[in-house]
Amino acid sequence: MNSITENTDNTAKNAINAENKLIILAGGTGQLGQHIAGHLLQRGAQVRALVRKGSASQAVPSLRKQGASIVEVDYTNVAELTAACAGGACVVSALSGLRDVIVDAQTNLLTAAVEAGVPRFIPSDYCIDFTKLPAGSNRNLDLRREFSERLDKAPIKATSILNGMFTDLLTDEAPVVLFKIKRVLYWGNADQPMDFTTLDNTAAFTAAAALDPDTPRFLRVAGEVASVRELRKAASAATGKLFHLFRAGGLGLLKAMITITRKVFPQKKEVFPPWQGMQYLHNMLSGLPKLEPLDNNRYPDIRWTPVREVLATR
């Protein structure tokens, strides 16, 4: 009789969990977080956005207007975070920062999720495959690896979303497509395949994964897989102007430049100093963190935006 009762209780719990669409979103005021919130709401989810106490971000009223509920939290207060996570089906982190955020704040959020009984956790990874890179090759990804090790030891189901580089960066922040001089800058091999995914596509996929109870430990996506040579073709097609390749040297030279730049301009408290971007580019051009296999077809309603379309918006 007891076993029948227990089975009935478990069935009821599973039914409740299957219907639970409350997603706890940390980092919802950031650019990626706002996109994730929007896609979650479009998919019929309830979004509880965790916002730092006293935040003056203009994204807060925007999130509230879209339909998200806002809860102010102190990321150093686990009890407060636990209360904020109560009833959630999944915690999605889009937090951005250095050790105090990626390791410390996320660890507190993870502890809170476990204590609140949240079954799933999506960390703030959204990058190339850091599991394939040697320690020390990328500071920001080393922090993600460190948190990933903590996450794997926690009694919660975890899923990391890996998307390569945000394609949006090619129009401005990443000095690869040089629009003024019509060149595509690179080091090493111009035919090395690399992964590019727009911020919005990444957010759409993350939202779908957050509502999917059967996700694996890692999901890998790429809006487009393109080499430097293919970036040149995309830039030419997008602008109607002929672009050329500009090889600055081998990967050894780029590594030396990173070392020098980091010594001269350490900017240790900056999340994305110039040398950090150079590290990321070196990683991608090395081919080591190439994403495979890709899971683009997991949610067929997502239309993947090619590089050419993004470059055309410049």
Image (cartoon, grey):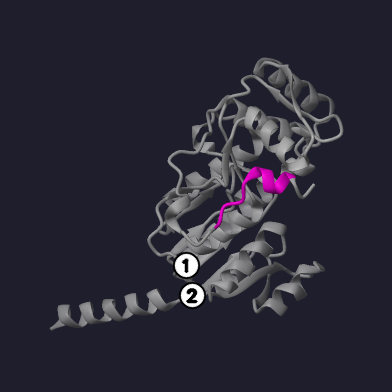
Nearer-the-camera pick, 185 or 182 = 182
Q: Which residue in the protein does label 2 denote?
A: 21
Quarter of the picture holding the N terminus: bottom left
Q: Residue furthest left?
A: 1
SS at mark 2 in the image:
loop
- Labelled disc at residue 211: 1
From the viewer's perspective, tell me whether residue 314 is left or right of residue 161: right
Task: Say whether marks 2 and 1 touch (CB < 8 Å).
Answer: yes
Nearer-the-camera pick, 181 or 209 = 181
Please tell me in which quadrant of the rendered image residue 251 appears. Answer: top right
Q: Is residue 270 among the parts visible in the rendering?
A: no
Residue 5 vertical placement versus 81 (above, below): below
Bounds of the magenta span?
A: 303-311
Residue drawn 50% across the image and 51% down it:
160
Q: Is residue 166 magenta?
A: no
Q: Residue furthest right?
A: 180
Residue drawn 53% across the image and 59% down it:
302
Residue 270 vertical placement versus 16 (above, below): above
Residue 46 x %, y %:
56, 77
Residue 41 x %, y %:
59, 73
* Amino acid type, mark 2: Lys
Residue 85 x %, y %:
54, 71
* Amino acid type, mark 1: Leu
The Cα atoms of the two marked residues, 2 and 1, are separated by 7 Å
Residue drawn 70% across the image and 68% down it:
51
Residue drawn 70% across the image and 25% down it:
186
Q: Is residue 150 among the parts visible in the rendering?
A: yes
SS at mark 1 in the image:
loop
